[in-house]
Amino acid sequence: MYQSFQTFPKVLIEAGSTDGISDFGILMRLVLPNMKATVASLGIKYGGDNARTQT
């Protein structure tokens, strides 16, 4: 996940801040929607492990 954030285009973050979006807004409106696959894979990995251990 760290590598995904490091490779995210800085130009998009700069464009968001130029438009007046807060840091949290940039994360929620620009970064996370573009990283759906990364977030989904984490959810499957850690969410699936949690579901298997509950009995």
Image (cartoon, rainbow, N blue to C red):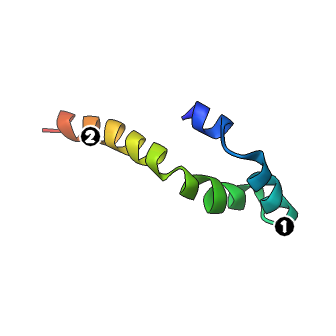
Please name the amino acid that badge 1 sits on.
Gly
**C-beta proximity under 8 Å, tags 1 and 2:** no
Query: How many numbered tags mark residues here?
Result: 2
Q: Against 7, is 23 above or below?
A: below
Residue drawn at point x = 60 percent, y = 31 percent: 3
Direction left: furthest residue: 55
Question: Neighbour class for label 1 at 10 Å: few (<14), some, many (≥20)?
Answer: few
Q: Position of residue 7 (x, y in %)?
A: 66, 37
Q: Secondary structure at mark 2?
A: helix
User: Quarter of the image containing the N terminus?
Assistant: top right
11 versus 29 height, above or below? above
Q: In percent of the image, x 20 and y 33: which residue is there?
A: 53
Provide residue 14's location: percent of width, then percent of height. 82, 54
Which residue bears the numbered disc 2?
A: 48
Image x and y of residue 34, in percent:
57, 54
Q: Tell whether 46 sits left or right of 27.
A: left
Please give the name of the residue rendered at 59% of the width and 32% of the height, measured from the top-left corner. Answer: 2
State the residue in front, 52 or 36: 36
**Residue 16's x, y, as percent?**
78, 61
Kind of element beneath mark 1: loop
The residue that disc 1 covers is: 20
Residue 55 numbered mark, or none: none
Alpha-carbon span between mark 1 and mark 2 = 38 Å
The C terminus sits in image quarter: top left
For the point 78% across and 65% down, the residue is: 21
Where residue 15 sits, quadrant-wise, is bottom right
Give the residue at the far bottom of this rendering: 19
Which three-letter amino acid code belongs to the residue tagged 2? Gly
Left of 10 or right of it: where is 34? left
Q: Quadrant of residue 52?
A: top left
Say whether residue 19 is left or right of residue 37: right
Q: In the rendered structure, which disc, 1 or 2, sits on the residue that comes first in sequence?
A: 1
